[in-house]
Image: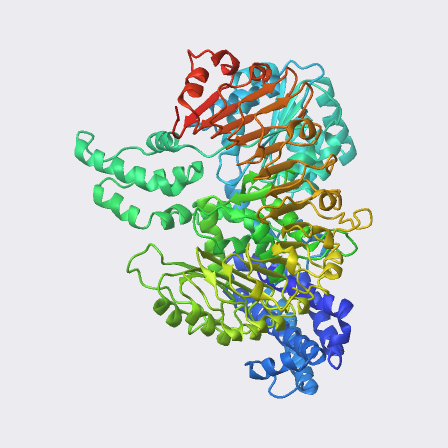
Amino acid sequence: MVEAVVSPVIERLGDLLLNEAKFLSGVRVQVKDAHTKLLWMRAFLKDADAHVRDGDERVRLWAVQVRDTSYDLEDVIETYVLKVVSKRNGRGVISVLKRSACIFRKGIDVHKIGVEIEKISSSIATLTSSLQTYGIRELRVKEFGETSSNNIQPQRDLRRAYSHVVENVVVGFDKDMEELVARLIGKENPPRHRVISICGMGGLGKTTLARKVYHHPQVRAHFDCFAWASISQQCVVREVWEGILFGLTSPTQAERNEIKSMGNGEIAKKLYNLQKQRKCLVLLDDIWTTSAWDGLKAAFPQDEIDSKILLTTRIKNVAFHVDQNGFIHQPRCLNENESWELFQKKTSCFGNDPTNSKDNQIMGVLGREMLKHCSGLPLAIIVLSGLLSTKHTVNEWEEIKGNVMRYITKGREHNDSKYSGVSSVLGLSYDELPFYLKPCFLYLAHYPEDATIQVKELCLMLVAEGFIPSRGASTDSIEDVAYDCLSELVERSMIQVEEWGLTRKMKSFRIHDLMRDMCFSKARDENFLQFNDLRNRGEEPLKSVSTNIRRVAIYFHSVDDFLPFVDNINSVLRCLIIELVKPEKVLRHVINSFLMLRVLKVSHKGDLKLPNEIGKLIHLRLFSISGRVAFVENIPSSIGNLRCLQTLVVKSWVVKVPNVMWKLEQLRHLSLPYFLGISAFSKWLRLPNLRNLQTLTHVQMKYLDRNDFLQLTNLKKLAITVDRNLERIFQDPTTVTFVRLRHLQIYCHDKGVRVDIVPMILSYPKIYKLILEGRIVKLPEQFSPNLIKLSLTRTDLKDDPMPTLEKLSSLRVLSLQEASYEGNEMVCSKGGFPQLESLQIKSLKNLEEWKVEEGALSSLHFLSIVGCWKLSRVPDGLRYITTLKEMKIDNMPRGFKERVEEGGEDFYKVHHVPSRLFIGSYYE
């Protein structure tokens, strides 16, 4: 982990030296020297981390020193830079900084800072020179993120699978085996898939499934010859080739000696030709890297032949790299019944006396409770079953239950193998992460168990922390790079996607309970982050906090619990996430104690008054406030001092917002409340310097200066409340275009007035998501050709919107919400809505007739009809929509429901729909 700590510091110093050298005046030489020494040290850190994993206590203590020294260097330089910036930007900030508890007492003592940096630099040099004492070797730069130390190999050897060891107890894989066998022996001409991959997280049973398929009778009858190769990280290509050739040919000893005498080119050619001449099945088990395949592929034909490759991997990108047209199968976790079946088959007995049914019943209840902690992961169930097989009394089972997670993750404590638990298996995935992904993964430890994690929010936090490496000349934004990092965790089977967005990008994900437990354990052991959730734990005592911890997530109810809890935390805290009732006292304590904070997230219940001292947090990059049905009394004007602020999110109602946002030149994401009183600003909310702004939500147009607004050319998301004076900003749509905007929300709350939003829509030619709420004059005749989602609410359209909307060739989601259309008839014509997948019609009170012609809505999957009380029947054209999979009817007249139900006169129109859901009240 020390590599993952040092690398972001190196990146940050490199950026300062390259892009902000003017702020290093007086200490640039010292900073460059320290940066060079860290670069030199980084070449050794991967091997140092491997020594730490292998239990070398001396190297662990050395790594702690390196980590702390790197943090010290970053703190000193960053504070110096901000001091220089503050002096240049005005006295207001300086007056705040003079009250701050930082390394400067009066002004900027350049000599003192230079000496301090030199002292830290000298410490780095001393730590580097001591590496040889511990036997730590240098790894070349090209090895970063690609290979790992030999110290991991013992774990790999213990995990190595062999083709002749057949697992007799397999549960939940029947359908998986059927599909994989069919793919392998399929009669396609030409063969459809050359490579069949089994991909998923550690412990999911990939090798077990592959072995069952490998030995399946139909597979054995189909192929002529077979070979199994277990691939390690240090893949020795020659040895793997020889092993495969031995398996495919079953050579005599003389033939073995002949193979061993061949050159690499000869043996690769022999393997290549053999697979073209005969139907061979080669199983590559547990392949980790693309470079391993690149070394092996010369021996495998790339064209379509009868031979096949079956491989297992945790990393989806590896499978895709081997064959972009291959088939990738991802096994699922077991459900509750399957988990219990596997548990019963793996647990030898419930007690010494099989006639003691009472004990068996009790142990059965205990077993089911303990199984919940396995979350359907086969390896965890097998570990638990093995532990309980040696326990024959209820008391022993109850003892295991009291510490079930420790037993599952660590395995049998008396076993000679310290790798027998789940944590070591899942830990391999963590150990293999490149340095830039390790902090991204450990950061997940601050989320509560079973949380659905929002990708956008997490990306902004990772950027604020400085964990995301830059891509040099790439045009990708730093948020895009953060997204790619999370996508890589998905590819490595360490997190699971929960929801995909309309543009096929990940919106949210989850982390398996046991993977989270490993993440939590690593974060704690590395002193990276501490998580505390006391909301539902009664009188459980508080855990002590490490004094040097830099990130804390706290979910408390009581302020009295919080204050003593954080009193012993070091002032270098960088991230604090708190959920409290009425946290004003807590916030004041936080602001005065933790001046180095980069991330501050506050979730509160009840009204909140932000302290004026918020302006002291000059290092803050992300500040988020959210509350449930609550007001934030004001945002203090001192927030203008936060010159590093990148993200400001206020989800509570706000009474007053100061006109200082223009000072926050680094601001990229600004999300304000839905409504701001007129007293919030003197006249305008000025935004002249926010040219980096990507998100601006829930602002009112009447408070925006036109010239400021037209400079926001980098906006990607805009949610704005407009009024009848819309033309004040959008006077000439031909010259005002925002080509980067993708997500637009327009709200019209001007009572009794219809707003012409056409000029505004035409100014955003590339949007893919549009939400309109409020009365408008008309719909535009021309929309963005990229439009994927459209939602209309209370637009009070007089003309049928379908003739206009059905021409949108890319539209996939359409929602006609309450009072969006005033008419009594809608018509979807032939060929209309070619890509629409989801259609919702809700609370159109005047709608009496809806016609769907044959050939319309040809891609529809989901249809929802809610609260359209005058609509008497579903359209006849629904019977032609064979793609329709789900229909939901809610709050509709009873007669409508009866016509659509089985036996009703309209049932023939929808009988082909697999899921028909009727909910809510029905009106006569």
Quadrant in the picture for residue 436: bottom right
Residue at 42% in and 72% down: 585
Residue lying furthest bottom: 106
Residue lying furthest right: 735
Quadrant in the picture for residue 578: bottom left
Q: Is residue 252 visible?
A: no
Please state, as top left, top right, bottom left or bottom right, where the C terminus lies in the image: top left
Residue at 36% in and 40% down: 372
Residue at 82% in and 46% down: 734
Q: Position of residue 418 (x, y in %)?
A: 44, 50
User: Does residue 118 lie above or below 487 as drawn?
Assistant: below
**Residue 509 located left or right of residue 253:** left
- Viewer-closest of 644 and 648: 648
Please state, as top left, top right, bottom left or bottom right, where the N terminus lies in the image: bottom right
Residue at 31% in and 40% down: 369
Residue lying furthest front: 752
User: Does residue 221 lie above or below 750 as drawn?
Assistant: above
Q: Position of residue 176 (x, y in %)?
A: 51, 25
**Residue 572 located left or right of residue 707:** left
- Viewer-closest of 238 and 381: 381
Colour scheme of the picture: rainbow
- Viewer-closest of 683 and 622: 683
Quadrant in the picture for residue 500: top right
Q: Position of residue 280 (x, y in %)?
A: 65, 21
| Count of labels in the image | 0
Q: Position of residue 211 (x, y in %)?
A: 52, 28
Q: Is residue 627 visible?
A: yes
